[in-house]
Amino acid sequence: MTEPEYAESLRLNRELAREQGIDHPIREHRLDALLFLGNEEGLDLSSRAGYPAITVPGGYAETGVIAEGGYTTKGPQGITFVGTAYSEPVLLRLAYAYEQATRYRFAPPDPV
C-alpha cells in the first residue's frame, strides 16, 4: 500500500470518482444524491470515491437477459442512491421514502 503505483491509482480513482464523478453533478444540478438502476455501477463509483451508497428494492423482472459475466437480470432488481461524503442521513431518508412509496419489497417464498 506504499508503492507509488498504488498511491497514484488511489489518487486518480478518487479524483475521477469524487470531483469529476459524484461531486460534479450533485453540485452542478443541486441534487441530494445520484440514483443508479441496479447496484453495480453506483456501488463501484461510490466505493472508488469512498462515499456512501444504499441499495433498496426497485422491482422485480419477470423476464431477463443474460448480462455480461453470465448472470441473468431476471428476478429482484435494486436501485442505488449514492451521495457525497457524510451524506448518510440524506441517503437513509431518500431510501426509506422510496421504499415506503413503492412497496416493491416482498418476502421470498418459503422453500419447500
Image (tube, rainbow, N blue to C red):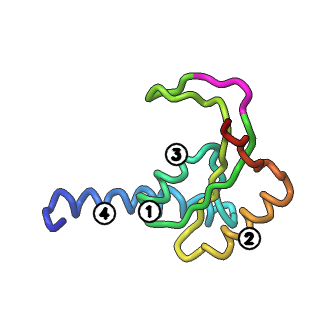
Choose the circle earlier in sequence order: 1 or 4: 4
Identify residue for label 3.
Answer: 40
Q: Amino acid at mark 3?
A: Glu
Q: Name the residue at 79% across, 48% down.
A: 104
CA gap between label 4 and label 3 equals 22 Å
Which of the marked residues, 3 or 1, is nearer the chain's N terminus?
3
Q: Is residue 62 magenta?
A: yes
Provide residue 83's location: percent of width, then percent of height. Answer: 59, 65
| Residue 93: assigned label | 2
92, above or below 103, in the image: below
Label 2 to label 4: alpha-carbon separation: 31 Å
> Type of residue at label 2?
Arg
What is the x, y in percent for residue 8? 23, 60
Please give the residue where the numbered disc 4 appears in the rendered image: 11
Q: Earlier in the sequence, mark 4 or mark 3?
A: 4
- Residue sticking out furthest to the front: 112
